[in-house]
Amino acid sequence: MAATLVQREFPGGGACFAPPAETSMTGFVLDEQGDWFEPDLSVVRRLVQPGWKIVDVGAGYGCYGLSLAAHGVAEVTLVEPHPAMGEALARGASLSAARATIHRCAAGPAGHGLLTDPRDPEMARLSEDGAHEVDVRPVDSMVGDPASVDYLKVDVEGDLHAALASGSRILAGDRAVVQMPIRLSGQHQGRSCALLMESGRTLHRVLPGLGVLVPLLPGEGADAFQLNILAIPAGRRDELRERGVVLGVIDELSPLPEGIKVQGVIDRLAAEPWAKTLCGAWAPNAILPGWDQQRRAVAMQRLAEDPDLAIADRAACLHQALAASRRALAAGMTGSRLVTAIRIMCAAGVRVEASRAAEALQSIGQAKDAEIVASFAEPFLPPLREHEGFAAPALPDLARCMAIEAGLFVPFFSAYFQGATKLPAYERATALPLHSARSVRVAAILRRMNQRQAPMALRL
């Protein structure tokens, strides 16, 4: 009996077919977030240009390939060996405006292999213990002219290096931007990274808060939450920098935008209603150790969010916000500082630190009302400005919801990776007067799963 497939639209166009959320990781994530969870995808949508030729190896249900096909690309090649996902890809490709070719085989040295048949087809891999024989073909053989490929994504379970190396003619050119996971099953993909660097490409990572690519610096690939890398060939570097998709090395020592007066930004923030609600009287001097750094962190974050600034200037502001937030936390872990730090750290792509801050926030969220108010007494708390009509008496409930949701969302990219046992936590969040729409969606999905008594995959 064929699996039920549900059509889902991508932001900006395109659609795919995937099983219901109760039985599929992809279905769950798309229903939970309205898009695929990897921040890299939104950057790649900006990266690709009309007329590009793209190749998606390990296409799955098409979250990358079918989404990108809606952005004016000339041709998309989808490679997926699992028969169920191949059928879903075919249905999605039939809706695509781009010329789509599907190869129902695995990528690697030419031959045959055995594909495993796990409960979740997305985890299928070539193995001696596999259940189904499949063709294995080099990536180069699946495109008419390897030198004309503009974007290559390789994301397969199993031998990633073999699949990537089978596209040697694509890598030999100076045209294709290459994307791959930086780790599989917890193992850093050093050999594949080396192969990309030997081809003359430089490794980059996504800066999530700004949606741009920045060079991957030594040590950053060790972050457990770093998902993918994108390797930029020298021939594309200047073009992508001019388009504002790729930046050079920017850190906390990078100069601020010309004419920016940080104190002026701080003063304007202090005058906003959401700040006055928390502090009736504004004191220009520090109330607690690190108070000046907390003010600076929020001011620099506000500048980083300003669309009128150049993207490189915004990146410099984000790095300064991160440095100031770290110093503020070192001086004292108040609720205001933790919430601010979580937001800045997630934007900067340092989610391991953000997870530690989320863990520290849990104890504050469980405190008595008076203790919560005291811990959030500093007026600089950016998320509060998003709640129109916020009133001080609602602060304890808001802080508790922020603590619950930070503990649920920050350590994981999706609720799928937590398991259905987290439903009570989502129900506690949705019972509070202030909560996110995402908590509501996840709670509804998990309730349906419990009703079906469907097991939940627990994997990262």
Image (spheres, grey):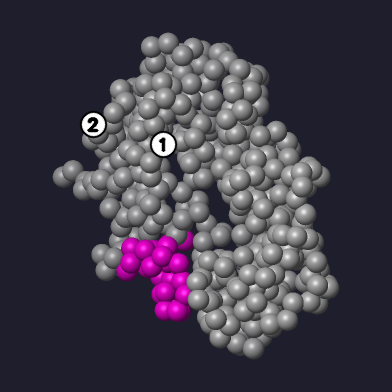
| Above or below for 432 versus 326 | below
Classify mark 1: helix, strand or loop: loop
Query: Could you tell me which residue is drawn at 80 percent across and 66 percent down?
Result: 292
Location of residue 196 (image quadrant):
top right
Three-letter amino acid code at the position of disc 2: Ser
Along the line of sight, the residue nearer the viewer: 333 or 297: 297
Query: Could you tell me which residue is drawn at 65 percent across and 73 percent down?
Result: 275
Residue 396 appears at what percent x and percent y?
57, 82
Q: In the image, 181: left or right of 250?
A: left
Q: Is residue 446 magenta?
A: yes
Along the line of sight, the residue nearer the viewer: 226 or 165: 226
Which residue corresponds to mark 1? 64
Q: Judge the density around disc 2: few (<14), some (14-19), many (≥20) Cα neighbours within 10 Å.
A: few
Which residue corresponds to mark 2? 94
Compare marks 1 and 2 and give the one earlier in the sequence. 1
Per the picture, the main secondary structure of the magenta-coloured stretch is: helix
Three-letter amino acid code at the position of disc 1: Tyr
Q: For residue 156, which numbered disc appears in the image?
A: none
Residue 9 appears at what percent x and percent y?
31, 45
Location of residue 143 (image quadrant):
top left
| Above or below for 307 versus 292 | above
Q: Is residue 321 magenta?
A: no
Along the line of sight, the residue nearer the viewer: 186 or 31: 31
Residue situated furthest left in the rendering: 1
In the image, the segment drawn in magenta is: 418-447
Residue 345 appears at what percent x and percent y?
65, 55
Q: In the image, 211: left or right of 458?
A: right
Classify mark 2: helix, strand or loop: loop
